[in-house]
Image: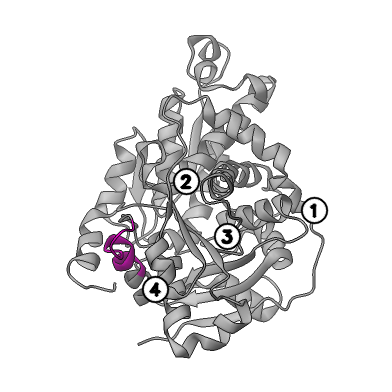
């Protein structure tokens, strides 16, 4: 069985200006925008009290994003907000006017040049962009990497997008989509990773994820009368992880929770970057069942936040995700079952390994995980690949 690998964050702090993206006043504007959608309601925060006791924790809370806008994943939060910001910029109007009602109105369409939004995705981001574009009367073109399941492609196609699976990995798909957007008039690249000169839109996407973080913190405080001591968050390009770390650093500046960044071993570019002390790229096929995390190049915007605010970086083989999927689907009596997909459940699998496997004792102790810990996990997707979900949960597969 392939081992879990980890490193504590020992990097010196750098300029932390990107954390301001997730300032609380900015996040409140994001939530106001999302509240304008008729599909909006906060997704559930599940308190797994029996599981917490079994693992020797003070509390365990799982944000269940399988209910988000009927799309089975959180990514639509970033894509919808970034598209609205882009439209506000194109039309010269204030963001405060960009409600769902206005964005979907004939009034806006009469003044907005039709726009095609290009993006690359392993699944959920592209579906979110396609859904938002369709809702607002625009078009999306989505490029997906080799190995993508047909069900993920069909989910995007159902939203009216032009979508293809390419014979290349995710990072090369990003470059393909960027080139196509640059070559086609009336097109905009709507990507959740950044590079020098392309930072504004990825920053807006990160801000969009603030709605999920703000809901979770609010639900913990109101429903459980707790604040998190530890937050486990997945990283592909790192935009979500950076957004979550930045949000909690702003919400609890005096005593932020420990943020543990969790990656697929086949694409552990943040873990490798933390070891190197600078951005490190992982190349190759990036083959992992955690499709949403199969990204080999860190987003430099979110990386800046993570090197300042993450406590640890952990590289997880596929069996860790499979363990988490099964535990959430079949919890201890009294706890709610959660349908969590391959990229959504890896934090649960890692937490269970840390608390139960003596091979992980050193990391458990370094993170001070114990009976006083209140741990927040983000189950970022449901069964977005239903056939594979059943093979793992029902059939015992780990790939």
Q: What range is drawn magenta here? A: 324-335
The picture quadrant where one finds residue 25 is: top right
Whether label 2 touches label 1, CB < 8 Å: no
Q: Position of residue 6 (x, y in %)?
A: 56, 81
Coloration of the structure image: one colour
State the separation of the CA atoms marked 2 and 3.
13 Å
Residue linked to disc 4: 54
- Is 393 situated left or right of 287 in this image? left
Q: Earlier along the polypeptide chain: callout 2 or callout 4?
A: 4
Residue linked to disc 3: 238
Q: Relative to the observer, which residue lies in front, 201 or 385?
A: 385
Residue linked to disc 2: 75
User: Which residue is located at x 60 percent, y 22 percent?
Assistant: 98
User: Which residue is located at x 40 percent, y 36 percent?
Assistant: 69
Q: Secondary structure at mark 4?
A: helix
State the separation of the CA atoms marked 1 and 3.
17 Å
Circle 3 Cα neighbour tier, 10 Å, few/some/many (<14 / 14–19 / ≥20): many
State the separation of the CA atoms marked 2 and 1.
24 Å
Q: Secondary structure at mark 3?
A: loop
Q: Secondary structure at mark 2?
A: loop
The picture quadrant where one finds residue 241 is: bottom right
Q: Earlier along the polypeptide chain: callout 1 or callout 3?
A: 1
Q: Earlier along the polypeptide chain: callout 3 or callout 4?
A: 4
Seen as rendered, the residue at the extreme bottom is: 359
Q: Position of residue 187 (x, y in %)?
A: 54, 33
């Amino acid at each position: 069985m392939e081992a879990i690998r980890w490193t504590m964050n020992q990097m010196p702090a750098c300029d932390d200006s990107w954390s301001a993206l997730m300032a609380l006043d900015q996040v409140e504007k994001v939530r106001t925008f999302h509240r304008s959608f008729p599909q909006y309601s906060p997704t559930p925060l599940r308190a797994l009290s029996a599981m917490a006791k079994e693992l020797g924790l003070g509390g365990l809370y799982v944000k269940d994003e399988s209910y988000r806008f009927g799309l089975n994943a959180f990514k639509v939060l970033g894509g919808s907000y970034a598209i609205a910001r882009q439209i506000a910029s194109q039309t010269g109007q204030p963001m405060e006017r960009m409600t769902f009602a206005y964005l979907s109105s004939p009034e806006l369409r009469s003044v907005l040049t039709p726009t095609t939004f290009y993006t690359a995705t392993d699944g959920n981001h592209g579906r979110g962009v396609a859904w938002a574009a369709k809702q607002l009367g625009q078009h999306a073109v989505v490029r997906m990497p080799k190995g993508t399941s047909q069900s993920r492609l069909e989910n995007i196609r159902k939203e009216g997008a032009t979508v293809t699976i390419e014979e290349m990995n995710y990072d090369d798909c990003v470059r393909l989509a960027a080139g196509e957007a640059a070559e086609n008039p009336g097109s905009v690249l709507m990507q959740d990773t950044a590079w020098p000169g392309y930072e504004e839109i990825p920053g807006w996407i990160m801000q969009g994820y603030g709605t999920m973080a703000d809901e979770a913190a609010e639900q913990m405080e109101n429903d459980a009368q707790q604040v998190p001591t530890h937050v486990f968050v997945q990283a592909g390009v790192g935009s979500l992880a950076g957004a979550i770390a930045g949000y909690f650093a702003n919400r609890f500046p005096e005593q932020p929770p420990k943020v543990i960044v969790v990656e697929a071993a086949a694409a552990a570019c943040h873990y490798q970057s933390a070891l190197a002390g600078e951005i490190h790229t992982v190349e190759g096929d990036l083959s992992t069942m955690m499709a949403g995390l199969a990204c080999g190049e860190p987003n430099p915007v979110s990386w800046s936040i993570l090197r300042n605010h993450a406590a640890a970086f952990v590289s997880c083989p596929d069996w860790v995700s499979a363990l988490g999927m099964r535990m959430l689907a079949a919890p201890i009596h009294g706890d709610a079952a959660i349908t969590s997909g391959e990229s959504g459940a890896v934090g649960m699998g890692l937490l269970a390994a840390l608390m139960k496997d003596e091979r992980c004792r050193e990391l458990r102790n370094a993170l001070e995980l114990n009976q006083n810990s209140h741990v927040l996990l983000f189950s970022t997707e449901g069964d977005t690949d239903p056939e594979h979900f059943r093979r793992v949960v029902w059939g015992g597969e780990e790939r």
